[in-house]
């Protein structure tokens, strides 16, 4: 056939090693997952059961929903540290707009369920927009901008609940957050749908291509006549909305809305994206990587419970695994650059 | 170089390959103390690879490497440095926020017994060194505040006076004005008297013939000729470089060239009283359909800023832009693109996505024309294939990562981005910089084709040859102001240089 096939074959024939090296980013997280899974399967008879797999899926769902938006942000070589705080404030807002039992001492504003949900989503979109404007119009680095937003969102949460706990959320949210259909939790289905949606957008749409190109080489994207600021702004809003959805469903899942409820989700979401192999330098990776990362984290968290480890040691082990993943992430980038030379 | 003298550096049978492609094949090279050795060859001929081996950048190769007759094997650039070898790379690598003196002494500032930097001594010695080089500048000035040409001279001075016995200069003159080039050459000659061995790489063959004692020519990874400079000519060197009749290909532009009658076609771009802080002062001109407007000036004359303003990347302090009579203030490069303006900047790194395949590089600027929401990869590949065929990009594989292509082919991809839906105004910065003669001619032909299609084209360059080979009308930009227009009159390299 054409010369294209011929030279493509030639390129492949140049060796499996360079190919594997360039794919290191995708292979390493998958190997980690298999190793962890095998280890826990042997270490604990209760780990590799169908029931427990279901548990793991449920446990990673909220992180998964938040990580969808974060994947967009990290692909653009930016970061969003406000995800957990925005999830928290959105979850609190949806409860704030719902009629609570009389013993809940919050001066809230009961509204119809649909309006409550809509207002909450507007709130998180608005906070995302503030992030976007700070990053693109004013030019504050996303690391600092979202650090400030983390405080702002926590502040709004505090003002809304004033140290109290709210329990009621709109019926739809309760169903999606804690109900199930045919034995499968709605939460898992929503997470799967959002991950799928994120993947389709990133892979098959023009916007998705722009995200990768802006992350790959921002300067070149600008010289190609792309509206880089618009794209960066859009990913910040997407990230905030995903976080908000995760927050609302999370509140329903936990059965309560209160301050600092989502704090662990910041690190977990970043870890899921990065452990999965999405490059912190932008332009490489995707939702597929994030899914693998989610499972690595889920298996690790769940598995450590099964093997009866000191719960304080668990925190240290998670930190070490995250460090290892970051090391691999940076090395994979270097190996790829070498392979491209 | 005297007969019987021992070479300070000797390479025998050097072979180096990158991913199965041989960049150097059995090259012998000898350098003598007190010699200026010129190196010429097309891009990808192997000059830079050989120099990087000498400077310890590439450490894996086969062949023998001798310094003062001793076999050596460098593991890093540090080792090379310790052996007295220093290199000035093509790209400026200075620390703009440090002072001139700190830059001159970068990495070996004089310190006292407590390890503290001796500022006064450093400033004095830096001033003395630079004065030897004919540079009169305050050693405590911030380097970034100086003109680019001067920064380059200071970087070269740093390497020349670092005590190295072997100095490699890769394209040192590209950013320098003619008087600065003369100053550099005078210094090189003085160092030669003192016994330093100098390797001088340049695309400017006149410079090579002017300053070097010996010239070596590379072609396709082999050394094809080595002669005394006095015994050769520009034509002979070009012929050796490209292996075919060179005279006709490389126009020297020393004789007058007649510019055509200015075109009377419609005005595409009108620039009025454009100013930008210290870079541009009241710049006004017009660009017409079917005309190539050349803008010539030395490095740092404001060309770069002008091109960025035209493409919406920089905002002018004052002045107006009119595209087809409509005033425009571009809020982003996207707005400029939609208004029909396209820019190819001088650096390919700024323009292309090296980790992405060729077809994505070609389609990125036109995605909104071929897809609304969903991507159409088949169509993208078809468009890219057509462009690759038309511009003869090698290898003709649109799925290959851009980084795998050679520099000249990457430059063609940068052009290809804009050609599927031709813009009204195409702004080209240094379109042929660093290209070999063949690729240069390809680009010249592409630009002529586009002019025939009725595009308004602006070519900005610091190389007179580039402007002369392409332009129908030439403006000269000097320190941010337009000082001369050549139209419908004879023009030559000398006249251009004189005006700038």
Image (tube, coloured by chain):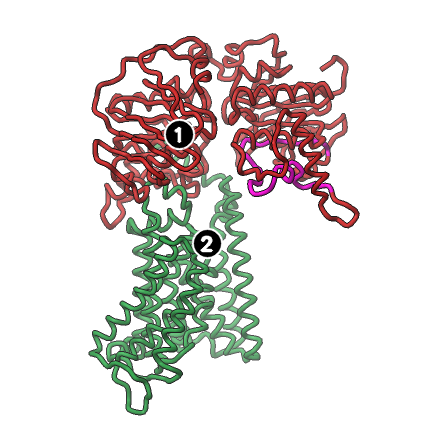
Tell me if residue A243 comes above or below residue B71 in the rendering.
Answer: below
Magenta span contains residue B17: no
Label 2 marks a residue whose chain is A
Local packing at callout 1 (Cα closer than 10 Å; few below 14, some 14-19, many 20+) is: many
For mark 2, give the secondary structure.
Answer: loop
Q: Give the colour in which the image draws chain A.
A: green
Residue drawn 31% across and 22% down?
B292
Q: Same chain for marks 2 and 1?
A: no
Q: Give the colour in which the image draws chain B.
A: red
- Return the x and y of residue B41 as percentages of the image width and height: 53, 21
- Return the x and y of residue A14 as percentages of the image width and height: 49, 39
Tell me if residue B288 comes above or below residue B311 in the rendering.
Answer: above
Q: Nearer the viewer, residue B405 or B307?
A: B307
Task: Give the extent of the magenta segment.
Answer: B83-110
- Return the x and y of residue B203 as percentages of the image width and height: 51, 21
Which mark, residue B325? none
Which SS does the magenta portion mostly show? loop
Magenta span contains residue B84: yes
Does residue B98 appear in this view? yes
- Return the x and y of residue B207 as percentages of the image width and height: 55, 17
Q: Can you identify the residue that label 2 sits on?
A: A279
Does residue B62 appear in this view? no
Label 1 marks a residue whose chain is B
Q: Can you identify the residue that label 1 sits on?
A: B429
Residue B366 quadrant: top left
Residue A159 quadrant: bottom left
């Amino acid at each position: 056939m054409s010369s294209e096939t011929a030279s493509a074959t030639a390129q492949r024939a140049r060796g499996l090693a360079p190919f594997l090296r360039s794919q290191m980013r995708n292979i390493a997280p998958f190997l980690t997952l298999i190793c962890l899974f095998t280890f826990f399967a042997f270490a604990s008879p209760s780990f590799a059961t169908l029931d427990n797999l279901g548990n793991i899926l449920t446990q990673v769902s909220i992180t998964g929903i938040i990580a969808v938006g974060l994947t967009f942000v990290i692909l653009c070589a930016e970061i969003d540290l406000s995800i957990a705080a925005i999830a928290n404030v959105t979850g609190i807002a949806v409860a704030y707009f719902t009629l609570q039992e009389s013993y809940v001492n919050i001066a809230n504003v009961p509204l119809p369920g649909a309006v409550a949900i809509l207002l909450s989503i507007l709130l998180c979109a608005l906070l995302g927009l503030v992030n976007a404007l700070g990053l693109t119009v004013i030019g504050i680095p996303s690391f600092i901008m979202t650090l400030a937003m983390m405080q702002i969102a926590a502040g709004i949460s505090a003002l809304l609940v004033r140290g109290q706990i709210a329990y009621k959320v709109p019926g739809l949210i309760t169903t999606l957050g804690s109900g199930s259909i045919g034995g499968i939790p709605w939460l898992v289905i929503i997470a799967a749908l959002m991950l799928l949606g994120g993947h389709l957008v990133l892979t098959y749409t023009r916007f998705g291509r722009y995200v990768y190109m802006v992350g790959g080489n921002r300067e070149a994207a600008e010289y190609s006549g792309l509206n880089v600021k618009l794209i960066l702004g859009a990913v910040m809003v997407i990230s905030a909305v995903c976080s908000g959805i995760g927050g609302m469903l999370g509140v329903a899942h936990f059965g309560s809305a209160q301050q600092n409820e989502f704090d662990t989700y910041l690190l977990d979401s970043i870890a899921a994206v990065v452990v999965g192999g999405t490059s912190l330098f932008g332009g490489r990776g995707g939702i597929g990587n994030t899914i693998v990362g989610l499972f690595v984290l889920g298996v690790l968290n769940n598995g450590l419970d099964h093997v009866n480890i000191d719960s304080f040691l668990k925190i240290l082990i998670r930190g070490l695994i995250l460090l290892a993943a970051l090391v691999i992430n940076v090395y994979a980038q270097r190996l790829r650059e070498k392979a491209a030379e | 170089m005297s007969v019987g003298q021992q070479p300070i550096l000797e390479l025998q049978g050097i072979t180096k390959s990158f991913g199965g492609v041989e960049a150097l094949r059995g090259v012998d090279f000898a350098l003598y103390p007190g010699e200026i050795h010129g190196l010429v060859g097309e891009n990808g001929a192997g000059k830079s690879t050989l120099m990087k081996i000498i400077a310890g950048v590439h450490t894996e190769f086969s062949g023998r490497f001798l310094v003062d007759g001793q076999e050596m094997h460098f593991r890093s650039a540090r080792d090379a440095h310790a052996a007295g070898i220093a290199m000035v790379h093509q790209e400026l690598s200075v620390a703009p926020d440090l002072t001139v003196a700190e830059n001159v002494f970068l990495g070996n500032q004089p310190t006292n017994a407590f390890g503290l930097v001796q500022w006064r001594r450093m400033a004095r010695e830096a001033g003395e060194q630079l004065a030897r080089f004919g540079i009169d500048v305050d050693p405590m000035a911030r380097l970034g505040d100086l003109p680019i040409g001067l920064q380059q001279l200071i970087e070269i001075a740093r390497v020349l006076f670092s005590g190295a016995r072997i100095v490699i200069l890769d394209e040192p003159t590209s950013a320098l004005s003619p008087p600065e080039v003369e100053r550099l050459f005078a210094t090189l000659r003085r160092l030669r008297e003192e016994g330093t061995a100098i390797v001088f790489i340049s695309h400017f063959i006149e410079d090579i013939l002017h300053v070097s004692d010996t010239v070596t020519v590379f072609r396709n990874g082999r050394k094809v000729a080595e002669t005394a400079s006095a015994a050769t000519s520009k034509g002979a060197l070009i012929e050796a470089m490209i292996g075919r009749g060179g005279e006709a290909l490389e126009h020297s532009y020393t004789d007058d060239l007649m510019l055509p009658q200015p075109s009377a076609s419609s005005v595409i771009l009108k620039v009025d009283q454009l100013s930008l802080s210290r870079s541009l002062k009241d710049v006004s001109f017009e660009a017409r359909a079917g005309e190539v407007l050349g803008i010539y000036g030395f490095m740092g004359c404001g060309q770069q800023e002008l091109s960025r303003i035209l493409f919406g990347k920089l905002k002018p302090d004052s002045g107006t832009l009119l595209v087809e009579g409509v005033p425009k203030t571009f809020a982003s490069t996207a707005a400029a693109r939609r208004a029909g303006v396209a820019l190819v900047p001088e650096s390919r790194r700024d323009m292309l996505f090296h980790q992405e395949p060729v077809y994505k590089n070609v389609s990125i600027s036109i995605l909104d024309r071929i897809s609304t929401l969903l991507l159409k990869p088949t169509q993208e590949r078809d468009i890219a294939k057509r462009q690759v065929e038309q511009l003869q990009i090698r290898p003709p594989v649109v799925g290959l990562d851009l980084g795998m292509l050679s520099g000249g082919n990457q430059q063609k991809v940068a052009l290809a981005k804009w050609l599927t839906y031709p813009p009204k105004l195409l702004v080209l910065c240094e379109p042929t910089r660093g290209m070999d003669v063949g690729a240069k001619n390809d680009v010249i032909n592409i630009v002529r084709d586009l002019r025939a299609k009725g595009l308004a084209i602006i070519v900005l360059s610091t190389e007179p040859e580039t402007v002369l080979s392409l332009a129908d009308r030439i403006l000269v930009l000097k320190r941010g102001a337009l000082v001369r227009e050549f139209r419908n009159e004879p023009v030559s390299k000398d006249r251009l240089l004189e005006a700038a």
